[in-house]
């Protein structure tokens, strides 16, 4: 098995009124704070072979803060929405990659332990999609086997992988991750969290 991470950080975050990816979370910029869930001591978690942060809006500013261990890819179609960014970034995966772990760069409450649980479930069920479960639904972070890469590469607009998860319900194993529901869309979200 070879699992690669795609961390989506391409959006313009219109509702945020600022560069969301660079917002301060406990003294760390948000994109790096979220990346830290997939790493330990500056290295990828044991079952992650490699990781790419998918950029779009404010790409130059965001790329500057990324650790050197992380690949940055600027999605040409980022303005068309998350679906387009994810679809395009499937094309940057290494040919030998068997699984892709899709995460979001604004799910600030997720920790390494939760990501390890997804990776462990993927090892036990390599043919299945492994998805975080929160609010009684399957969502990202999620690990997709190669059999689903072609569906991911056809995503469009602002919809991420949720439709693929719903349409393949029988092939999805859910891992409870209530903290995945917390994401940052506005400055108010950030303030609420700081409190």
Image (tube, grey):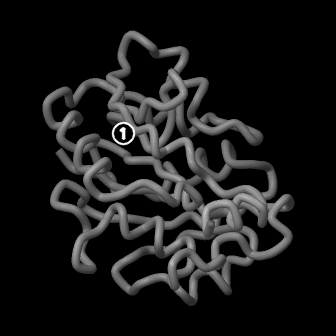
Can residue 145 be seen?
yes
Local crowd size for mark 1, using a 10 Å CA cut-off: few (<14), some (14–19), many (≥20): many
Where is residue 74? Give x, y as percent.
62, 69
Q: Secondary structure at mark 1?
A: strand
Where is residue 158? Give x, y as percent.
75, 41
**Front-most of residues 178 and 9:** 178
Q: Is residue 128 above or below residue 57?
A: above
Tell me where residue 146 sits by quadrant.
Answer: top left
Q: Is residue 118 above or below residue 13?
A: above
Which residue sits furthest front?
195
Mark 1 lies on residue: 143
Can residue 77 be seen?
no
Q: Quadrant of the N terminus?
A: top left
Relative to residue 12, is residue 139 drawn left or right? left
Where is residue 13? Give x, y as percent.
78, 61
Q: Is residue 91 above or below residue 127?
A: below
Tell me where residue 187 sits by quadrant.
Answer: bottom right
**Front-most of residues 133 and 64:** 133
Which residue sits furthest top?
170
Relative to residue 148, is residue 124 drawn left or right? left
Residue ID at (67%, 86%): 61
Q: Quadrant of the C terminus?
A: bottom right
Residue ID at (71%, 58%): 189
Relative to residue 113, is residue 167 drawn left or right? right
Residue ID at (31%, 50%): 115
Residue ID at (64%, 36%): 155
């Amino acid at each position: 098995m070879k699992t690669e991470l795609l961390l989506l950080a391409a959006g313009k975050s219109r509702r945020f009124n600022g560069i969301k990816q660079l917002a301060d979370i406990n003294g760390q910029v948000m994109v790096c704070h979220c990346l830290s869930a997939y790493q330990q001591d500056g290295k990828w978690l044991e079952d992650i072979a490699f990781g790419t942060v998918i950029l779009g809006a404010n790409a130059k500013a965001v790329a500057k803060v990324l650790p050197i261990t992380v690949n940055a890819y600027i999605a040409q179609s980022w303005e068309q929405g998350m679906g387009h960014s994810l679809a395009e970034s499937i094309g940057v995966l290494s040919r030998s990659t068997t699984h892709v772990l899709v995460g979001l760069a604004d799910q600030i409450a997720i920790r390494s332990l939760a990501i390890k649980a997804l990776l462990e479930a993927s090892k036990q069920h390599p043919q299945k999609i492994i998805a975080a479960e929160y609010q009684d639904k399957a969502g990202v972070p999620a690990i997709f086997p190669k059999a689903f890469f072609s569906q991911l590469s056809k995503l469009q607009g602002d919809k991420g992988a949720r439709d693929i998860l719903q349409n393949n319900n029988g092939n999805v194993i859910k891992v409870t991750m209530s903290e995945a529901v917390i994401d940052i869309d506005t400055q108010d979200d950030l303030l609420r969290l700081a409190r």
